[in-house]
Structures are given as C-alpha cells and as structure tokens.
Image (cartoon, helix red, strand yellow):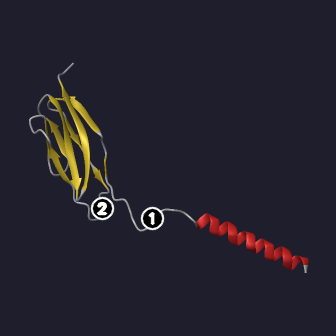
Amino acid sequence: MKNKYLLGVFFTLLYIVINMGCSDSFDRRSVEESFYVNKKKIEGEIGHSDQLIASPTSGSNVYTWASEDLNIVEVDGEGKVKLVGLGQTVIVVTSGEMKVTVDVVVKLKD
C-alpha cells in the first residue's frame, strides 16, 4: 500500500515538473528571417579589391548588391568590391525585404 502511495506521489510530481518546463511565452508560429554578410566594414586604398559573401548561400535567397556612391566603391552582382575613390559610403545588400549594410572607408596611402 505504501509503495502505491509513493508511486502515485512520484508520478504526480513528475507530471507537475514536466508541465512547468513546457510552459513558455514564445510565439512558435513566427520565424525570424535574416542573412549575414562576411564583413561589416571594408577599409583600404584606391584600387583595393575585396569579396563579400552573403549567407546562407543555398535555398531561395537571391542577393542584390549596390553601392550608395559609385565614385567611392563599385560592387558587382556577385559581391566583388573595388575601391575607386576617396571617402566613406556603404554597400547595401538586399534579399527580399531584408537588408544588410557594409561600411566602406577609402583612404590615402600612408
């Protein structure tokens, strides 16, 4: 009789612990979409080239690359960057509604 009582108490406590661990306030229906670019900032001199890579690289993500000032930096459709003039600007990478920026600083040779 005592064993049945202890077994009942054990399962009751187990049930309570499991249900306490399962209660949360997260909205499990929404998933944050995002992507990443391998560099946050590019610094260099005129003529310097670099390669930006957006990820994930698989799936349905299509990336668009754009320079906010073509007199300072050029970027092609594959993320290849060339510094062409002095100054500061940003490269904007978009995929659908998502956007990431990369700061660009072009300096004189030291």
Residue lying farthest top? 110
Left or right of 69 on screen, residue 93: right
Q: Which image quarter: residue 103?
A: top left
Residue where numbered disc 1 is placed: 27
Q: Considering the image in quadrants, where does the N terminus appear?
A: bottom right
Give the number of the mark in front: 1 or 2.
1
Can you give x and y, in whole percent of width and height, for residue 50 in the image? 22, 39
Q: Is residue 70 above or below residue 93?
A: above
Within 10 angstroms of label 2, few (less than 14), some, or many (20 or more) residues?
few
Q: Residue at x 10, y 39 (%)?
A: 70
Q: Amino acid at mark 2?
A: Ser
Q: Considering the image in quadrants, where does the C terminus appear?
A: top left
Question: In what element is the residue under mark 2?
Answer: loop
Question: In what element is the residue under mark 1?
Answer: loop
Label drawn at residue 6: none
Can you give x and y, in whole percent of width and height, for residue 30 in the image? 39, 65
Q: Amino acid at mark 1?
A: Asp
